[in-house]
Image: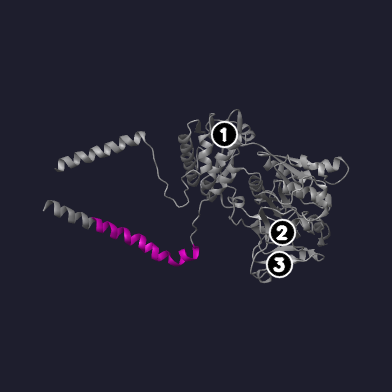
Amino acid sequence: MKKYRAIIGVLVLLSVWLLSLFVYERWDVTEDKRYSFSEGTLSLLENIEDPVKVNVYLEGDLTGNFRVLQNEIRFLLNEISRKNPQIQYEFINPISANLNVDSLRSRGVMDMSVPTQDKILRVFPFATVDTKGKTASVPLLSNKKIPIEERALASVDILEGNFVKEIYRLIFKERKQIGLIVHHDELLPNYLDGLFRVAAKDYDVTPYTSPLQNGTGSLQLSDLDSLSKFDALIIAKPIKPFSDKDKLVMDQYIMNGGKTLWMIEDVDAEMDSLFRSEKIVAFPRNTNLTDLMFAYGVRLMPSVVKDLQSSYITLAIGQAGNNTAYEQFPWPYFPLSISKQNHTINRKIANPIRFEFANPIEILPRDSVNAEVLLTTSRHVQLQKPMTYIDFGEIEQVKPENYPEQPGVYPMAVLLEGYFDSAYKSRIESQEVANFKSKSDLNEMIVISDGDFAKNHIFRGEPLALGADKYSMRPDVSDQATVIYDNAAFLINSLDYLTGDDMMIQLNEKQRKLHILDKNTVAADQKTWRWYNIVFPLIFIWLIGLVGMFIRRRLYS
């Protein structure tokens, strides 16, 4: 009998082994389904018919954490290739393959130095995707502001999104048309260069210049047909007031389904003026949009946000020998907002988002409109009224005791979604519009209470990347990296949402839950858990030994 049991056991094991050669299956039992593809990814992979070649350049001499990242990439690409054999991949070591570094950089593959105890490693945390004669580079490393080794592990979460987005862009994505309103002295092109660069992969951003060309300086009802060709409109820091004709045209654009991204402010304060005079007055700014925003469900409060949670600015503090000495100070007028991760738009945003002289937003309840707060101040906030002074002397007052915790926070970016009532539905101007529409179909708009939200800084005459903070740079430490905030990611996510890019939205929906240990609890209980880790395995092994002895006695006594 025992002999037959042994033979049956061997046959079962052989059958399982043979079956595993032909059938592959795995089960993802993680809470956040981190090892499963999102529905959007599966749908995309099923519809790819053309060959796709992926080259990964993260190969060669790597640290432990980068080796973990490499293994995760290999696992991901293997799963993608299994889902669709048209997608093939290869790992390439640029150094051993003697690849031209300049040629790699022209394709978007950059190298970086990773210090270790023994030496400095040269790694290439990029991949390229080639299909249908087109190429795109894929960053493999997160841009989180954490040490490089930790970034390697934190980058695992972005791999699926980064690869699939680039494949989607190359094969399926239709370019969207974004209009830029420019006839109210909005931001000039050199201050929007960073936005143009990050949007160039997916969008054609075109200034709408008809009001300037025809000499009216205002939108006309005849512009409605031209504006309807845009998938969304951006209004970035208007200085001149909107005319009644402007507002009527914008209102009907929205009523007819037009999407809008507003970056507006009701208080005038500029850092360039402050650096010149060291003291400025925060003047009210009249954009004449109050009634329009009121109809849709928001109001900009005419105050400037001062937040203890803020970015730093670099100021000269005197002389050190023959050189000027610099120091960095917190500047409460540049509040930092941490993504609430509560919506598709602000998910997967790794770094803080910076505002400059922002206004609080008041949400006005509307029966048919839902307001989703995307970005806020912290609770340690003050509001400064217009017609008051702003000067660098306030830096000395940036202390926790001067910014007591408030019962709530102030919104600074809001998504409005629903059925908007026209601001002109009970006004005589509505009679000027043929086929006037008093209520929109389901529509969305985003209001950001900072005109400089999409403004890139200019350094030595050259535009910096959107989110790069020139005020954080120290002239006495020339090789110090510029601090970069995630304004660009937020804006691109906003455009993806407004223009209805379902694939990008679904990729942002997949969120990995990070379970962070409480450091204070760990420090307090570490001895207890250390003993548990020593004693319980020994007891477990001892129990297995006792059970084994008992079974042997029953079988052979």
Can residue 447 be seen?
A: yes
Contact, mark 2 vs mark 3 (Cβ under 8 Å)? no
Contact, mark 1 vs mark 2 (Cβ under 8 Å)? no
Q: Which residue is mark 3?
A: 382
Q: What SS does tag 1 mark?
A: strand
Lateral position of residue 318 relative to residue 25, left or right: right
Query: Percent position (x, y) of residue 445?
Result: 69, 51
Of label 1 and label 3, which has the lower sequence position?
A: 1
Q: Which of the image's four quarters has the N terminus? A: top left
Contact, mark 1 vs mark 3 (Cβ under 8 Å)? no
Q: Residue furthest top?
A: 133
Distance, label 1 to label 2, CA atoms, is 43 Å
Residue type beneath disc 2: Val
Q: Residue at x 84, y 47 (%)?
A: 218
Of label 1 and label 2, which has the lower sequence position?
A: 1
Of label 2 and label 3, which has the lower sequence position?
A: 2
* Residue nearer the viewer, 266 or 430: 430
Classify 58 as above or below 449: above
Specify start and end residues of the magenta stretch as a single range.
Answer: 518-544
Lateral position of residue 556 relative to residue 116, left or right: left
Q: Residue furthest right?
A: 215
Neighbour tally class for label 2: few under 14, some 14-19, many 20 plus, Cα within 10 Å: many
* Residue nearer the viewer, 51 or 457: 51
Q: Which residue is mark 2?
A: 298
Query: Percent position (x, y) of residue 17?
Result: 31, 37
* Residue nearer the viewer, 532 or 453: 453
Select label 2 or label 3 by which is in front. 2
Q: Which residue is mark 1?
A: 129
